[in-house]
Image (spheres, rainbow, N blue to C red):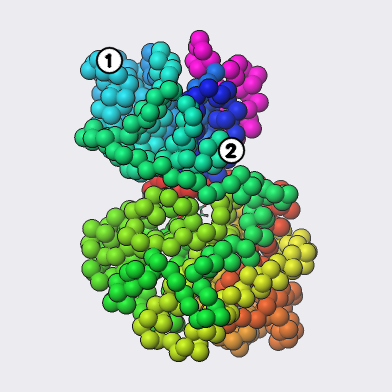
Amino acid sequence: MCGIVGYIGHRKAYPIVLNGLKRLEYRGYDSAGIAIYDGKELKFSKTKGKVVDLEKKLEAEISTEGTIAIGHTRWATHGVPNDINSHPHFSNSGDLVIIHNGIIENYEPLKQELKNRGYSFQSDTDTEVLVNLIEDVKKKEKVKLGKAVQIALNQTIGAYAIAVFDRKKPNEIVVARLGSPLAIGVGENEYFIASDASPFLEYTKNAIYLEDGEMAVVRTHKDMKVRKIHDDSLVDPYVQELQMNLEQIEKGGYDHFMLKEIYEQPDAIRDTFRGRMLADQGIIKMAGIDDHIDKFINAKRILIVACGTSWHAGLVAEYVFEELARVPVEVEYASEFRYRNPVIDKEDVLIAISQSGETADTMAAIKLAKESGAFVFGVCNVVGSSISRETHAGAYTHAGPEIGVASTKAFTTQITVLTLIALQLAKKKGKISTSDFYTYLRELDSIPEKVAEALTSNEHIEKIAAIYKDAKNCLYLGRGFNFPVALEGALKLKEISYIHAEGYPAAEMKHGPIALIDEQMPVVVIATKKGHYEKVVSNIQEIKSRSGKIIGIVTKGDVDVKNLADHVIEVPETIELMTPLLTTIPLQLLSYHIAVMLDKNVDQPRNLAKSVTVE
Ligand code: G6P
């Protein structure tokens, strides 16, 4: 994980790098640092803590002049978060300075070798080993910095996005990537370097996303050349025009990004099907699917791999695909799948779901499936992300930037896109009647309005949150399509409020979790009409007879659960397989309000990061 930012050009570099780090804090926020060449000397400051802590420290310590700077916000892998382990790191001579996102796996033997050659190390990081390796190569081989970086990287095993410069030659920054993202913003005689494009949106809309195994030397007043790290061959970089705007990555009057993103869901879901679904004409058009429809029709099974919330979206999709398209689906944690020697058939279709499009385990699962000859389809939110480029085809969710670490709109838009795919496949396979197809499309078309209606329960949910904010444990139950929603509701509460929560299939409760129920235990039960409603009502009876506190998520107008539960939160009625798009909303709001009341950092929960680019 970690976020990296750099600037070289004619503007003052410090504010660009500092603001860039603030925008990249979602990638990690346990320590931060900046190095600036002020025209005479290389200045730096780094600290444990967030970017605001760095800002205070740095402005008190050093001058912020200079037109070349690099900065880093960290999510610790090697070495605890402290000032010394924070980036940037320096070579022993003090000439070279580096920032790094990733892991150098063979850093131990490299470190030993460098120690034998007289190098010493201040920090516990793999990054300090890399910068000294570069210095060693530069001296030994008498080569320029770019070449030294290339030779050194060819000796490493692992993942990196790096930016490095030499205080003795402060007119160039060398960047390289393998397994961690790196975007270069191209301005007029200036370059911006960052883990994603958000740090330079107000300066340029032209971005180059380095591919894995590529490096570049960015210099002022010179065109940039991109090369392959392993064989030095030149690459013609593709300059992409960015569609994102600044407004999308700001809070827009909300207290937290998470709340803003919860409220964006009606629009985000609409954006997901806009141009893809003509509900009145009964048409779905999705190039990523239509161009490869044979692969989907002939698939013996669909494998879904993902992590975290995206994995929960995959579980919902399993129910939806099997229901509509009658194709067997298996959903796997990418981290398990990649290491358990899975049986993958050439006729399998693997769908990888990832908001960021950068999750290392999901990426590894994709590579494995490709090696086995399977067709790999990506469902990503971040346009141009590594996973979106590694897959054979895909569909973006178009949810817009999601900054809150706890995922919200990514989840509902992933379900939306996957439902569209399942519907299209069902139609092409002849598994659905024309009239049912129309019914589903019209219903999906009405979901944004229904999500907006579900959001009107916000104040009611806030009151319920006030009652349960001090709970130590919480149970979430659901069945069928809403079992994954129960998992997701529990995850949201854990992530941002640090209250232990468990999601369970409602009927499984009696095989274990029922032992936990007493008058202290809030149990959130998703009990929407249709499906297994009566069965869930029986499960609620079982909780009530053990004095558990019941919060029911029910269909508007429900009576039965209302009579049993301590509280109910209503959502509008919809077709059963679309209920997750509505039942998720109150669970997101409940965890949000509890976390706010407990004074937790909602957007940047402890120990987490939005984009997990390490195994
Ligand atoms: C991290 C985030 C989660 C996210 C998961 C998968 O753990 O904190 O919110 O669901 O990674 O991320 P992806 O970008 O692949 O969906």
Which x, y percent locates residue 282?
50, 81
Circle 1: residue type? Lys
Task: Write down the quadrant of residue 503 in the picture.
Answer: bottom right
- Residue found 68% across the figure and 78% down from its top: 572
Q: Residues within 10 Å of mark 1 (few under 14, many from 20)?
A: few
Residue in front for this viewpoint, 222 or 289 = 222
- Residue found 60% across the figure and 34% down from its top: 19
**Mark 1: secondary structure:** helix
Q: Say which label, 2 or 1, has the lower sequence index.
A: 1
Mark 1 CB lies closer than 8 A to ligand 1: no
Q: CA distance from mark 2 to mark 1?
A: 39 Å
Q: Which mark is residue 501?
A: none
Residue 494 shown left or right of residue 432 in the figure: right
Residue 310 shown left or right of residue 549 in the figure: left
Task: Write down the quadrant of residue 380 in the picture.
Answer: bottom left
**Residues in magenta?**
37-65
For residue 160, say whether it is visible: no
Circle 2: residue type? Glu
Residue 411 shown left or right of residue 547 in the figure: left
Comparing marks 2 and 1, which lies closer to the viewer?
Answer: 2
- Residue found 59% across the figure and 66% down from its top: 270
Residue 462 to residue 196: above or below: below
Magenta segment includes 447: no
Magenta segment includes 56: yes
Q: Which mark is residue 202?
A: 2
Which x, y percent locates residue 109?
26, 30
Q: For the N terminus, give its image quadrant.
A: top left
**Mark 2: secondary structure:** loop
Which x, y percent locates residue 496?
62, 53
For label 1, the residue is 139
Residue 492 to residue 182: above or below: below
Which x, y percent locates residue 584?
61, 68
